[in-house]
């Protein structure tokens, strides 16, 4: 039987995402059930409701590996009424619909490609767009996503803007997609005025950023990767590293990441994945990550479609055994910015929900957002 289909995993056209994982080695383990009684045991095991793991263990052990994989795959690939894979519904397996919350969203800088994509996704989700925006160079007001936007440049009083915005919009949350050099200064501004924020900008002093937010008690989501499906892959790699430390000891690793030429820093996602590989026993330094920014090389080597040279994220992780006879290759290839924009909106809605509930926990990452099960 076919275990996976292209409808379950692979291309997500609406997000412009292509995610693939390839293993050069295959495992074959399939033993036919010995008897009719064995089939009956399998059928009975599917309806066992006991919460005790030992009660289910005999039935699981009776299944050949191929059949057990089939059963798990069918659950993972089945979808609920929202078209969401059941495996992505939260850690407890229960659909947790996002409650309707009032959100007033300021996007800095809404004129940038990511900022504009977030504003578009936010309006589509019914979120109110605040008509103010922090920007770099001075610019005249303009209409963006149906809202006439006033821009506050670096020469103007940004503290006054924060005070004004907070007074006018009591449910204010800020999304930051600016530049690495502004990360810490912007975060300090939001913290000073106790304005909740989602930091999607990569770079800056991340340790200081996290420490400042933690000490302030301000609500925030901070993550270098906002694409929900990529975050799920990232979390899976971390679980593997924590569960099987040293499993790939002796293997060599090559990491290549390609982004639009305007991205000046190394991918934060690639760095996080490398940490998991280090836990798995690989001797690899994040400084060895290969950054591809040349358009010609991106098209010829990374196979990036030319129409997405200005907005893509192609990552490849290649592992090779010491004798060169075994290899593993992981890829996640993204075209466009929709996956990040939608993930950012989910982070905003999750943060608004936590604020409304008065959660004692104030600082979140995207893995925790996914664990909430609030996936639109």
Image (cartoon, rainbow, N blue to C red):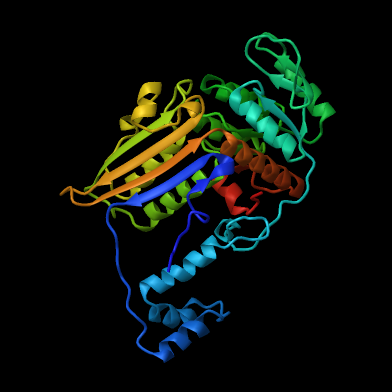
Residue nearest the viewer, comparing 196 with 274: 274
Q: Is residue 294 visible?
A: no
Relative horizontal placement of residue 356, taking residue 92 as reference (left or right): right
Residue sitting farthest toward the right: 168
- Picture quadrant of residue 116: top right
| Left or right of residue 120: residue 54 | left
Q: Residue at x 64, y 47 (%)?
A: 361
Return the x and y of residue 127 as percentages of the image width and height: 76, 37
Residue 309 in the image: above or below residue 64:
above
Residue 286 appears at what percent x and percent y?
A: 35, 34
367 on left or right of 282: right
Residue drawn 45% across the image and 38% down it: 269
145 to 66, vertically: above or below: above
Q: Residue 346 in the image: state x and y as whole percent.
A: 65, 43
Q: Quadrant of the N terminus?
A: bottom left
For the question of whether residue 42 can be seen, the reply is yes
Tell me residue 87's x, y (percent).
55, 59
């Amino acid at each position: 039987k076919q275990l996976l289909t292209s409808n379950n995993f692979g291309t997500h056209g609406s997000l412009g995402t292509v995610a693939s994982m390839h293993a050069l080695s295959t495992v074959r383990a399939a033993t036919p059930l010995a008897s009719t009684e064995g089939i009956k045991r399998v059928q009975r095991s599917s309806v066992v409701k006991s919460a005790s793991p030992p009660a289910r263990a005999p039935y699981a052990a009776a299944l050949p590996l191929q059949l057990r994989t089939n059963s798990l795959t069918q659950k993972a690939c089945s979808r609920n009424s929202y078209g969401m894979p059941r495996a992505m519904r939260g850690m407890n397996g229960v659909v947790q619909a996002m409650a309707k919350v009032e959100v007033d969203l300021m996007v800095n800088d809404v004129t940038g490609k990511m900022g504009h994509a977030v504003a578009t996704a936010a309006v589509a989700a019914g979120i109110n767009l605040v008509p103010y925006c922090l920007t770099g160079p001075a610019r005249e007001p303009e209409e963006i996503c149906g809202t006439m936007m006033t821009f506050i440049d670096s020469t103007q009083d940004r503290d006054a803007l924060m005070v004004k915005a907070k007074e006018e919009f009591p449910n204010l949350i800020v999304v930051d997609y600016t530049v690495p050099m502004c990360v810490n200064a912007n975060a300090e501004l939001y913290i000073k005025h106790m304005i909740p924020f989602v930091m999607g900008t990569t770079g800056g002093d991340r340790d200081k950023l996290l420490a400042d937010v933690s000490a302030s008690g301000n609500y925030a989501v901070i993550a270098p990767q906002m694409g929900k499906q990529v975050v799920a892959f990232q979390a899976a790699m971390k679980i593997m590293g924590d569960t099987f430390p040293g499993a790939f000891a002796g293997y060599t690793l090559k990491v290549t990441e390609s982004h639009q030429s305007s991205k000046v820093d190394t991918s934060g996602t690639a760095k996080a994945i490398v940490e998991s590989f280090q836990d798995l026993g690989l001797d690899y330094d994040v400084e060895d990550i290969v950054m591809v920014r040349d358009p010609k090389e991106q098209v010829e080597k990374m196979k990036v479609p030319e129409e997405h040279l200005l907005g893509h994220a192609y990552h490849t992780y290649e592992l090779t055994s010491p004798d060169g006879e075994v290899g593993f290759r992981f890829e996640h290839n993204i075209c466009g910015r929709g996956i990040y924009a939608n993930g950012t909106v989910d982070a905003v809605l999750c943060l608004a929900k936590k604020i409304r509930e008065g959660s004692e926990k104030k600082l979140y990452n995207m893995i925790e957002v996914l664990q909430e099960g609030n996936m639109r």
